[in-house]
Image (cartoon, rainbow, N blue to C red):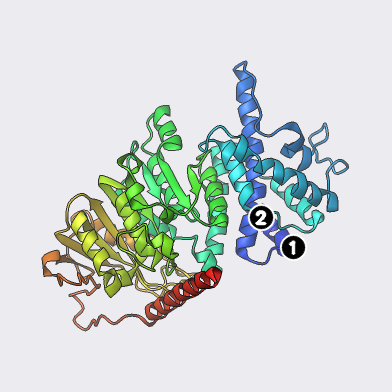
Amino acid sequence: MFEQTFRNIDGVLRQEAGCTTELDYTEQSSWIMFLKYLDDLEKDRAMRADLEGKTYSYIIDDKHRWSVWAAPKKSDGSFDHDSAMTGDDLIAYVNDELFPYLRGFKQRASSPDTIEYKIGEIFSEIKNKFGSGYSLRDALELTDALRFGSQAEKHELSELYEAKIKRMGNAGRNGGEYYTPRPLIRAMIRVVQPRIGERIYDGAVGSAGFLCEAFEHMRAQAKSTADLETLQKRTFSGVEKKSLAYVIAIMNMILHGIEAPNIVHDNSLGRSLSDIQPRDQVDVILANPPFGGSERREIQQNFPIRSGETAYLFLQHFMRMLKPGGRGAIVIKNTMLSNGDAAALRKELLATCNLHTVLDCPQGTFQGAGVKTVVLFFEKGAPTRDIWFYQLSPGRSLGKTTALTDDDFADFLSLQPTRADSLKSWTVKVSDLNQTTFDMSVRNPNCADEVAYRAPEDIIEEIMALDAESADILRGIRELL
């Protein structure tokens, strides 16, 4: 029902000089959709209050309400083109009045957990990139046709938004930072099996794919209004460093049915591990930390095992954030299993957690990233004795039109509960590992001719990461001079 509207909005954005990439299209359509969603939410709340004989206090004041500036209507409900702002007047209003008003909610909100605070956060992080008030007017009128009323409408919009995020992820390296293939996420969730009453966390939240899919998985467990409230308010939390990803994550969770997402705009790694207390720890962690990133020296000081590789710092963060008995499923580059600079991290993981499963993902799992990955499944609190490996091989080269599907994980999910050996799976005893390097390279013993060479793209990726780290160090030196 809404698919053509989404296409038309993207068509308008492509005509804007300030919008040149899929990331821009997603960002700009997100803030407009968010305000339309908020207007529909307020109308629904006001109607319910009226039926109950109560008075509803609107979040957005009269002057800045969607129905006043974005989509004024005549008495018969048709669009009032005569009173609708357009051209330079519309751009001036959005930039000089609307956005400053919305940013102010961050200071006026009673708590970071409220939707008011999220409004302030979102509009503190993004800018209007429309230069033409005529193009913006077209986008507003198209968006006004969207409806966020019924569950069916929200479900359709959430699927369309997910498709938009996927296109953004496939568009290039930067977009790929925000998109983890949903079949992979769903398989990870099925292994971890989160339950209502447990707290679920992602410290590198991206587009919130893990949290949205976990919500969908757990919603079927809800047997009462109290269960639904627990899912809405006390289950999911995340942290995201980048502004665009933060905005997309908020919008994505809202479309999936979480009205005030508990997502914080911050750097998870900026928090010292010693500052994480038992009350902060969670039951389940699902995450895909950035590939090949690097952090400043002062950030590395927060970790007992220091590294220039962002993902290695994230793994330490996640290990600390899990409560005893907690369960983690983390996507990480496969070089973590063998690189010399990760030996101390491997030793710590094996000593403090039961790393029971390693899923080896095929080349091309992440479109455009050129990185080979594995998924680490572990439980905190007891050392690892045996590691079960599964080598995922869908039998085809992966690409944009041949991406992983849910069916590709069927064999893995059938074998994983018992960790049975097969042509694609095998078990390694920790006592058989080199007790100095703890090298856990993926070597399928059922493939006699397999030689564990590093893939060229892995080598190139590591070189690029080292170059980026060197550039950061040089930048820091220049700033001090």
Give the amino acid type for the residue marked by disc 2 in the picture.
Answer: Gln
Which of disc 1 and disc 2 is earlier in sequence? 1
The numbered dot on residue 308 is none
Give the amino acid type for the residue marked by disc 1 in the picture.
Answer: Glu
The residue indicated by pointer 2 is 28
Q: Is residue 103 left or right of residue 307?
A: right
Image height of 166 relative to 434, above or below:
above
- Mark 1: few/some/many CA within 10 Å (<14, 14-19, 20+): some
Q: Helix, strand, or loop for circle 1?
A: loop
Q: Given contact means CB atoms under 8 Å apart, are the residues at marks 2 and 1 in contact?
A: yes
Q: Nearer the viewer, residue 330 or 316?
A: 316
Does any portion of residue 50 appear in the rendered image?
yes
What quarter of the picture does the C terminus occupy?
bottom right
Answer with the quarter of the image where residue 57 lies. Answer: top right
Answer with the quarter of the image where residue 66 lies. Answer: top right
Q: Is residue 121 left or right of residue 138?
A: left
Q: Residue furthest left?
A: 431
Identify the residue at image location x=39%, y=47%: 201
What x and y, as percent, mark residue 122?
60, 47
The residue indicated by pointer 1 is 16
Does any portion of residue 2 appear in the rendered image?
no
Q: Is residue 188 left or right of residue 238?
A: left
What x and y, as percent, mark residue 149?
60, 37
Image height of 155 relative to 185, above or below:
above
Q: Helix, strand, or loop for circle 2?
A: helix
Identify the residue at image location x=71%, y=32%: 61
Q: Nearer the viewer, residue 258 or 347?
A: 347
- The residues bearing labels 2 and 1 have C-alpha atoms spaced at a distance of 11 Å
- Mark 2: few/some/many CA within 10 Å (<14, 14-19, 20+): many
What x and y, as percent, mark residue 137?
78, 51
What x and y, as percent, mark residue 101?
70, 41
Identify the residue at image location x=48%, y=56%: 206
